[in-house]
Every structure is written in C-alpha cells, then in structure tokens.
Image (cartoon, rainbow, N blue to C red):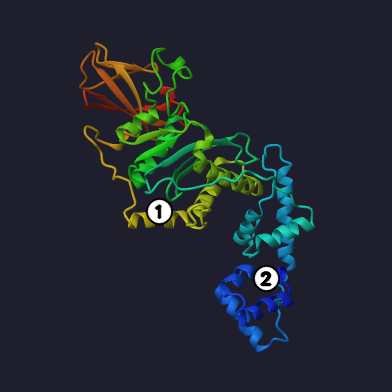
C-alpha cells in the first residue's frame, strides 16, 4: 500500500513486524492490518532486520518535483479562461469545466503533456473550478455477446456549435457489444432519407446486423393516435410501416423499440461525450458552418473508436470489434441482393404506390410520368433513390418486375430530402 505512512507510525509498524518475528501473529493477519500484499510485507521485514535503527515507512521523494514551464502554465490558464467565457454564451448549456478535454487539447495542439490533477490544481488556484453535484451511480454493462447483435441508432437535436445560427441533428449508429461508432453525421434537417442513408452506409460496409434499437420517433414507428392524422383512423400501432422500417424489413433486420431515453443509455452517453467536446471545439474555432463542424466530429469519432479506452468495456472500441471478428463473435450477415431486386437502389430508397391509369401513366406530386411496359389499372411501386441534392432516380416496379427507370428533379417532385 503506497500510503502506509499516512495510517501508521514507524513505531507501530516496527511493533507489528517484531511480533511476527516472535511468531506471535501470523503473516496473513499483519497484511490485513497494514493493508499490504506479501511482497511489500517481506520487503519491510528485510529492511527492519538490516537496519532497525533507521527503519521508517515515511515517504521519501527520490526525484525533485517536475516544474511546469511558463509556456505550459500560460496555456493552461488560457484554456481555462476560454472555458469560462464559453459558459457565458447564451446557446451553451454546459456549466462545468472539462479538465480532460483541456489535457487532450494541450497535447493535440501544443504537444504539451499535462496531467488532469495538475490542471485541476491550477484551476482551483485561479478561480476556474466548479464543484460538481453528486449524481446517482449507474451500473453500466454490456448486455450482448456478439458484434451486430444490437445496433443502437438515434438522433440528437442541439446547438453543437454556439456560433451557428441554427441547431443541427446528429445521427449516430453504435454497436452495443464493442461500443464502436459505425456512423456519426451532422445534418441540418432530420428526414426519413437521412436515416435510410445511415442504414445504407452501415449495412453495405459492415453487413446486416441481427437487430436495430431505436426510440418510437415517427420516422421509425407508426403509433396509433399520435400519427393517425396521416393514416386511416382504423390502423393500429405497427400496422403501418414508415419508410425506414420498410428498408429494415427488406434487409431482414429485427427492430426493437425503446420506450424512454433512459432505456437507450448506451447511445445517450456517447452523445453526451461527443456533444460536450463538440461544443468546446466549435467554440474555440468559431465554427458556424456544418461542414466545418463535421470535420471536428470526424476527428472526435476517430479518437473515440481508435484511441480512447471505453469506461465500461475497458477496451478501445475498434480493438474490441476486431477481436470479436477473429473469435467469430459476430452476428453480421453479408449483404446480398435478394430477388427480385436488381440494385441497392431498390432497397435503400423511399417508396410510394400509385395506380396506372388507362393512358399508362401515373401522377406523383402533380408530376406526370408515362410508364413503359405498364398495364393499365395495375399497382406500381415507385422506389425513389436521390442521386444528389438535385436529381433522384425513380425505379418503377409492378408485379415484382422492374418495368421502367426515370430521373426527375427533386424540386419538381417537391421532395425535401436534405
């Protein structure tokens, strides 16, 4: 025990060890009394035997304390002042210093290595310290045994940059077992297409997971009464599949719904971690553009996945993810196109249905389309795949056959997707 000298005097330790040498007390009891292990115990016995007159357990520093350079001291105070100024911004909800962030910032930007206790000491001495309120302890644990067994997916609406004029949405997908962040993207508006894009990138890169875990947002789930204004009143909860859910069905992915934000704790905690550091970084760099903020987010995501040890798993997420692959602890399935689909555009898309009229055409948002190879009065499924901000590809399916492919302007179609 390193702090033995704070609990016992030299005379007390001497007396206990001498009683051991006289075989009055067994070693195991002395170790419990002193709070030390076997190696430390016998080291004390040897020291007492060799030099009983000068025996001591008092701590003696062998090296002088390392003094910080004036430049490091200056940078610590500078960053603490920036933190304090940030708290005064009306859009910032953070109300406490993040000394770990300052430590990392000094390392990344100035190549200066400083410990968190050193920064805290300087903060206390210069009036940059808030005592944190006590929070209830929360036992965090990994509930899955495989990667891909459960992918937590969610979005957060926040002022990720205090200098931005509007709030942005952060869409994130996280593996429960490894805590690896598959996807983290900022968007100005939350749409079904944004979440479908997230699905497409995760599934095409990593494979098809066993299940997705989301909340009951209308993008993910139709809830009777809440969403009934958009559907026939006799539809019950889960009788209607939103666009995102239809993609999941085509991929054969099980969807699990959380009933509260607390139930999604594993994804909420990374959000808080990213949100905290995003705000501090964007404030320092005067970020007002979402593309600039995305670069900062990419850097944070990389550090989260590849550098930092997760507090629950005690492993770096990427290493834990790769280890699971090597040990066959994966429920990811290889993505393959299932008949009758011809392209990934037929799966990761928006969908609407229309009836072909007698002139072999349909109308969608007041835009008329003449459909090749169509049969009047048949039902046609329109799979809409946005190619970019301006143009979408429309793939027309009827009787499980692709009968036509056309392109159209998003503004003409009145599609607000981005």
Q: Where is 374 relative to 45, above or below?
A: above
Q: Which residue: 22% across, 32% down? A: 340
Q: Which quadrant holds residue 32? A: bottom right
Q: Which mark is residue 4?
A: 2
Q: Which residue is mark 1?
A: 321
Q: CA distance from mark 2 to mark 1?
A: 41 Å
- Seen in the image, is 159 located left or right of residue 74? left
Q: Which residue: 64% across, 48% down? A: 280
Q: Position of residue 237 (x, y in %)?
A: 41, 21
Q: Which residue: 65% across, 40% down? A: 162
Q: Position of residue 154 (x, y in %)?
A: 48, 37
Q: Position of residue 90 (x, y in %)?
A: 71, 37
- Seen in the image, is 376 located left or right of residue 16? left
Tell me the element at label 1.
helix
The residue nearer to you, when weighing 322 against 109, is: 322
Tell me the element at label 2.
helix
Q: Extreme front residue here? A: 24
């Amino acid at each position: 025990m390193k702090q033995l000298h704070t609990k016992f005097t030299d005379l007390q330790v001497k007396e206990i060890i001498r009683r051991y040498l006289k075989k009055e007390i067994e070693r195991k009891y002395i170790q419990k009394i002193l709070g030390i292990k076997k190696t430390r115990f016998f080291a004390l016995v040897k020291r007492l035997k060799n030099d009983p007159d000068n025996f001591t357990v008092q701590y003696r520093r062998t090296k002088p304390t390392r003094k910080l350079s004036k430049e490091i001291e200056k940078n610590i105070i500078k960053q603490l002042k920036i933190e304090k100024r940030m708290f005064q911004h009306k859009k910032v909800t953070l109300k406490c210093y993040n000394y770990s962030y300052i430590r990392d910032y000094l390392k990344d930007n100035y190549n200066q290595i400083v410990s968190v206790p050193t920064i805290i000491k300087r903060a206390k001495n210069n009036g940059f310290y808030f005592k944190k309120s006590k929070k209830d302890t929360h036992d965090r644990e990994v509930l899955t045994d495989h990667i891909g067994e459960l992918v937590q997916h969610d979005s957060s609406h926040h002022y990720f940059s205090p200098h931005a004029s509007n709030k942005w949405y952060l869409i994130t997908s996280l593996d429960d077992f490894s805590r690896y962040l598959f996807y983290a993207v900022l968007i100005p508006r939350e749409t079904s297409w944004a979440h479908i894009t997230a699905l497409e990138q995760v599934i095409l890169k990593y494979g098809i997971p066993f299940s997705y875990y989301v909340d009951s947002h209308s993008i993910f789930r139709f809830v009777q009464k809440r969403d009934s204004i958009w559907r026939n009143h006799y539809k019950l909860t889960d009788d209607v599949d939103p666009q995102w859910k239809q993609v999941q069905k085509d991929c054969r992915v099980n969807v699990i719904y959380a009933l509260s934000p607390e139930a999604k704790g594993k994804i909420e905690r990374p959000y808080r971690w990213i949100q905290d550091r995003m705000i501090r970084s964007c404030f320092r760099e005067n970020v007002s553009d979402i593309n600039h903020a995305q670069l900062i987010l990419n850097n944070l995501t990389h550090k989260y996945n590849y550098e930092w040890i997760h507090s629950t798993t005690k492993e770096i997420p990427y290493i834990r993810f790769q280890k699971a692959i090597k040990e066959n602890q994966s429920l990811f399935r290889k993505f393959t196109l299932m008949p009758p689909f011809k392209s990934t555009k037929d799966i990761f898309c928006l969908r609407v249905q229309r009836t072909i009229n007698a002139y072999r055409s349909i109308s969608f948002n007041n835009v008329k389309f003449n459909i090749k190879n169509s049969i009047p009065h048949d039902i046609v499924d329109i799979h809409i795949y946005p190619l970019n901000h301006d143009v979408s590809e429309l793939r027309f399916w009827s009787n499980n056959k692709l009968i036509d492919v056309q392109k159209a302007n998003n503004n003409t179609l009145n599609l607000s997707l981005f």
